[in-house]
């Protein structure tokens, strides 16, 4: 299993990037009892047969990672959801994109730690892809939004140490504000 929920989110967003998405929307909502995550992309999508196989840990398309014989990201997500009394769903249409959603019971003893979302968000925003990533984050009704293109424009880019430091401060302050 993944060590944290943030690891799952990173894996799913990376899948969207590797599927040639130009627009990715990440929505994370937390209440005292539930964690809900949705990742929607406009990447290449999958046909019905590939979508079913993607849930199998011993399936990989062999294109993203040529030497790898397994694809564990989605199977780990489904395993985590099942083990924690939650649910996960993936919908995809070839040429249109993919939407992955999952809801987890925050009171379940087997729920992995959430992880450091500020660090995760910086990593995802600075990841070297040309597309746009939009994040909507909500904790008990308190929320904030971030848009990669807008942040890159405001900070003069996301590929230099100063811009990355400001980006980290942005996410850390927003996380602190909604999580306290």
Image (spheres, rainbow, N blue to C red):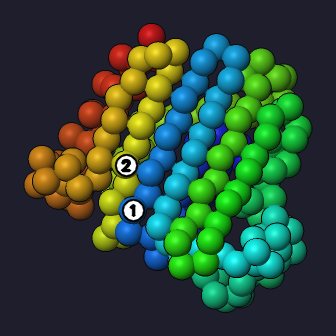
Task: State left or right for residue 135 relative to residue 111.
Answer: left
Q: Quadrant of residue 165?
A: top left
Task: State left or right for residue 134 relative to residue 149.
Answer: right
Q: Nearer the viewer, residue 89 or 173?
A: 89
Is the Cβ of the residue at disc 1 closer than 8 Å to that at disc 2? yes
Residue 114 location (% of width, % of height): 62, 32
Q: Is residue 18 something that shows in the picture?
A: no
Residue 112 location (% of width, % of height): 73, 34
Q: Mark 1 or 2 closer to N-term? A: 1
Q: Residues within 10 Å of mark 1 (few under 14, many from 20)?
A: some
Q: Nearer the viewer, residue 179 or 26?
A: 26
Task: State left or right for residue 116 relative to residue 111.
Answer: left
Q: Residues within 10 Å of mark 2 (few under 14, many from 20)?
A: some
Q: Is residue 156 something that shows in the picture?
A: yes
From the image, tell me which residue sits under label 1.
Answer: 23
- Residue at 64%, 29% (x, y): give it: 35
In this picture, is 46 found above or below 160? below
Task: State left or right for residue 177 relative to residue 12.
Answer: left
Residue 121 location (% of width, % of height): 42, 44
- Residue at 80%, 78% (x, y): give it: 49
Instruction: Using the numbered discs, state the Cα–Cα distance from disc 1 to disc 2 in whole angstroms.
Output: 8 Å
From the image, tell me which residue sits under label 2.
Answer: 134
Residue 38 location (% of width, % of height): 57, 45
């Amino acid at each position: 299993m993944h060590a944290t929920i943030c690891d799952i989110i990173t894996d799913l967003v990376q899948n969207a990037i590797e599927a040639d998405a130009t627009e990715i929307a990440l929505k994370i909502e937390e209440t005292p009892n539930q964690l809900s995550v949705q990742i929607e992309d406009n990447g290449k999508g999958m046909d019905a047969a590939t979508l079913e196989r993607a849930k199998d840990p011993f399936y990989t398309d062999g294109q993203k990672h040529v030497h790898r014989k397994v694809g564990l990201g989605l199977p780990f997500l489904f395993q985590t959801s099942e083990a924690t009394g939650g649910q996960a769903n993936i919908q995809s249409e070839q040429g249109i994109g993919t939407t992955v959603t999952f809801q987890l019971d925050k009171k379940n003893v087997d729920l992995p730690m959430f992880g450091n979302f500020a660090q995760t968000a910086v990593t995802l925003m600075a990841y070297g892809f040309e597309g746009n990533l939009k994040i909507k984050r909500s904790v008990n009704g308190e929320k904030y939004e971030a848009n990669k293109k807008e942040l890159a424009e405001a900070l003069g880019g996301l590929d230099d140490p100063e811009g990355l430091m400001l980006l980290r401060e942005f996410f850390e302050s927003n996380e602190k504000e909604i999580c306290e």
